[in-house]
Image (tube, coloured by chain):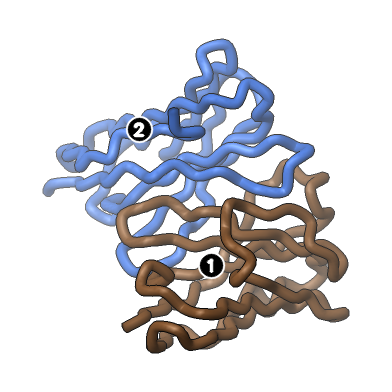
Amino acid sequence: QKEVEQNSGPLSVPEGAIASLNCTYSDRVSQSFFWYRQYSGKSPELIMSIYSNGDKEDGRFTAQLNKASQYVSLLIRDSQPSDSATYLCAVKRNSASKIIFGSGTRLSIRP
Amino acid sequence: ETGVTQSPTHLIKTRGQQVTLRCSSQSGHNTVSWYQQALGQGPQFIFQYYREEENGRGNFPPRFSGLQFPNYSSELNVNALELDDSALYLCASSLGGTNTHYGYTFGSGTRLTVV
């Protein structure tokens, strides 16, 4: 079992719709959760972090965390073509040095 | 305040050679983490340096080694290069070693191609 699992996609969403990206993780002791966006040929960019159960909103982005189900999701409202990228889910124990990444979900926003 | 900078941006090496990649951490950050990202995969943790000491290592062989300098910049050295070492190498700086719950900010990466 992978430590962080994501559907590789591609996920195709029409412009203006809500894109929903999902992630599960295996380590119950994980305490910090992140979403990174990575454009082709570029380095990952941190877009959201979440530490407590529930929802966290930042502009068009909402991260959702359910520690009991070991599940993290990212919603992108009013999707734009510029949102087309690979989205990486990542988790971390506060006592550990490493952030563990999933393989990413490729998102394509079609005009 | 400058961000994380990496050099070189691209590199082509021959199998069996050695390579050194460099990273300058963000101002005030004392921790550097290195990741390897193969095409179509997520970044894989290589190791972390905190105050010039190795502070955690991923599942990479000893031919992957590193250094952190007093100014907190860092090097990643890879000996006896193999074709599978071809990847994007990412450096991230942060503050506080393992005692941080903040996400890492990555540099722009070094694209290494081994032929």
Q: Secondary structure at mark 2?
A: strand
> Which of these two is toward me, B70 or B83?
B83
- Which residue bears the numbered disc 1? B90
- CA distance separating discs 1 and 2: 24 Å
Q: In the rendering, what colour is chain B? A: brown
Q: Position of residue B15 (x, y in %)?
A: 39, 83
Which residue is located at x 23 percent, y 39 percent?
Answer: A9
Amino acid under disc 1: Leu
Task: Kindly tell me whether residue B1 is visible in this rendering.
Answer: no
Which residue is located at x 30 percent, y 34 percent?
Answer: A7
Q: Crowding at label 2, few (<14), some or many (≥20) Cα neighbours within 10 Å?
A: many
Left or right position of A83 against B48: left
Q: Position of residue B64 (x, y in %)?
A: 60, 70
- Which residue bears the numbered disc 2? A21
Q: Nearer the viewer, mark 1 or mark 2?
A: 1
> What is the quadrant of residue B112 in the picture?
bottom left
Q: Is residue B47 above or below residue B21?
A: above
> What is the quadrant of residue A88 in the picture?
top left
Amino acid under disc 2: Leu
Q: Position of residue B68 (x, y in %)?
A: 78, 75
- Locate the C terminus of chain B and report the quarter of the image it occupies: bottom left
> Which of these two is toward me, B9 or A79?
B9
Q: Is residue A40 above or below residue A99?
A: below
Left or right position of B26 against A107: right
**Chain represented in blue:** A
Image mark 1: chain: B
Q: Which mark is residue A105?
A: none
